[in-house]
Image (cartoon, helix red, strand yellow):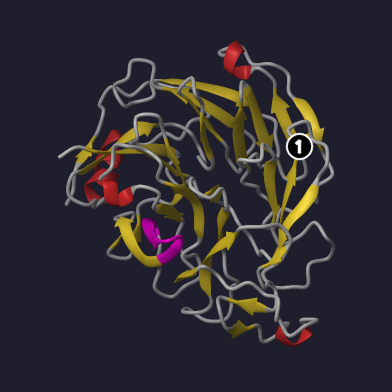
Amino acid sequence: MQNSVFHENLIIHPTDAVEMDPDMYHEILDKISLPDGFHINIYATHVPGARSLSYSKNRTLYIGTRGDKVYAVRDSDGDGFAENRTIIASDLTMPNGVAILEDDLYVAEISRIIKFPRIEKTLPDIPDYEILYDGFPKDTAHGWKFIRFGPDGKLYIPVGAPCNICLPPGDFYAAIHRMNPDGTSLEKFASGVRNTVGFDWDPKTGDLWFTDNGRDMLGDNVPPDELNHAPKPKMFFGYPYLHGGNIIDPEFGDLSPDGCKNCTPPARELGPHVASLGMRFYTGEMFPDSYTNAIIIAEHGSWNRKDPIGHRLTIVLRENGIPVSYEPFIEGWLHNGTVYGRPVDVEVIQDGSLLISDDMNGIVYRVWYNL
């Protein structure tokens, strides 16, 4: 069932913004299908390359990109449309990752983590940033980073494999790391992770769950993307030797030191080449009870598959912590073979609604529930 709303009172923004004919917003929304009772509107516009999202206690949405900018948008009048937009920085290197801790904004570039101290107190004035750590690899292939603070108070930072398939050339690659908020005590948390661009913690157990993109060039239907579960440190998730639960890599499978006996299989296999990126546990109170603590995944969409798939949100339901279903939730950005958008990240905000970034159109959507 389709339930969409479009705000006509768009703000004119600076010239770096993506200029989209307002009719195009209508066209996108008209394609999107949602379950009964769910509705969608465009929450923020003119955010070129909108990627990772972090929503603060002061109701400011920070948005990373794979360009050189980080944005902040705010719905000041509470009408469901963010009419205020601020460019936080415009000289960064693929600042994909954003995360808020207290009043500080953390940003992940390709090779470093920076912090804008007390920005929640100073906006619209923007403080000078501090460099917390600048020792990550500079490879751009899978080098963009999603970041998020865990329940242990540490900042989690992935470093993807610098290739489609290869033996990681050093301990940094194909792994998830964590550090203290001041940039100290960097350590590896998980390895064998090809490229994760989204993770979250189970609100009941505090366990880490993350998406991982499968390798390319094995065919249209293999391997699957993965939803992985890391309840403890030092777990190994198979890359580059094993994909999904049982697909041995034809180039590197025989090189596993132990025959992959210690490879952790995915908690749930996802669609092949759907490019599963951002994910969150639904912790709001707006959606029906069946959505509570469900995992919502943004599938950016395939790029090299004969028949494209993805370009949607999916939902994973669990019983006793074990995934039991994986189904479409919101669809329509891929319609009759034409791509109308590419979801990247999702974020649950204070009122229980869900925000979705779309880097193809430079916009953020808001999804809410009301029968």
Q: Residue at x 53, y 67 (%)?
A: 226
- Determine whether 17 is above or below 243 in the image: above
Q: Residue at x 39, y 73 (%)?
A: 307
Picture quarter containing residue 348?
A: top left
Q: Position of residue 254 (x, y in %)?
A: 74, 88
**Number of callouts:** 1
Magenta part mainly helix, strand or loop?
strand
Extent of the magenta region: 311-323
Q: Position of residue 203 (x, y in %)?
A: 49, 45
Q: Position of residue 206 (x, y in %)?
A: 56, 48
Q: Identify which amino acid the numbered label 1 is placed on.
A: Asn
Near mark 1 (Cα within 10 A), the count class, few <14, some 14-19 or many ≥20, is: some
Residue 312 within the segment the image draws in magenta: yes
Q: Nearer the viewer, residue 307 or 196?
A: 196
Picture quarter containing residue 134?
A: top right
Residue 138 seen by the camera: no
Q: Is residue 232 left or right of residue 273?
A: right
Residue 92 within the segment the image draws in magenta: no
Residue 36 seen by the camera: yes
Q: Nearer the viewer, residue 121 or 27?
A: 121
Q: Position of residue 330 (x, y in %)?
A: 30, 53
Q: Which residue is mark 1?
A: 180
Q: Residue at x 66, y 40 (%)?
A: 152
